[in-house]
């Protein structure tokens, strides 16, 4: 199946942001190199999916505001 690809899915979080990445790779060599780069950045958890070329759209907006302690009383 020439149209098969590998999709690497991983999440990175810091105090300022949380990123979910879904990255396609054409072959196992490219995928292995990407996993080695994740390991160097200490990203230990990821998912690999093998499948056909996919297209996805995700739109998400989250607004966070600091909670006022007076509201809890």
Image: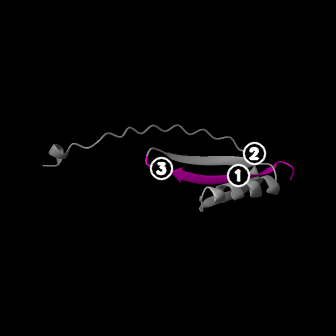
Q: Which residues are magenta?
A: 1-15
At mark 1, the secondary structure is strand
Q: CA distance from mark 2 to mark 3?
A: 30 Å
Front-most of residues 13 and 2: 13
Residue 14 magenta-highlighted: yes
Residue displayed at 29% across by 42% down: 66
Q: CA distance from mark 1 to mark 2?
A: 9 Å
Which is more foreground, mark 1 or mark 2?
A: 1
Residue displayed at 62% across by 59% down: 46
Front-most of residues 51 and 11: 11
For label 2, the residue is: 53
Residue displayed at 60% across by 38% down: 57
Mark 2 or mark 3, which has the lower sequence index? Answer: 3
For label 1, the residue is: 7
Which is more foreground, mark 3 or mark 1?
A: 3
At mark 2, the secondary structure is loop
Mark 1 or mark 2, which has the lower sequence index? Answer: 1
Residue 16 magenta-highlighted: no
Residue displayed at 63% across by 53% down: 9
Front-most of residues 32 and 8: 32
Q: Position of residue 16 (x, y in %)?
A: 44, 44
């Amino acid at each position: 199946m020439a149209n098969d690809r590998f999709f690497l899915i991983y999440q990175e979080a810091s105090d300022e942001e949380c990123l979910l990445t879904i990255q396609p790779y054409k072959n196992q060599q490219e995928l292995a190199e990407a996993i080695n780069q994740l390991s160097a950045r200490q990203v230990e958890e990821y998912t690999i999916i093998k499948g056909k070329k996919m297209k996805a759209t995700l739109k998400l907006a989250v607004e966070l505001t600091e909670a006022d302690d007076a509201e809890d009383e």
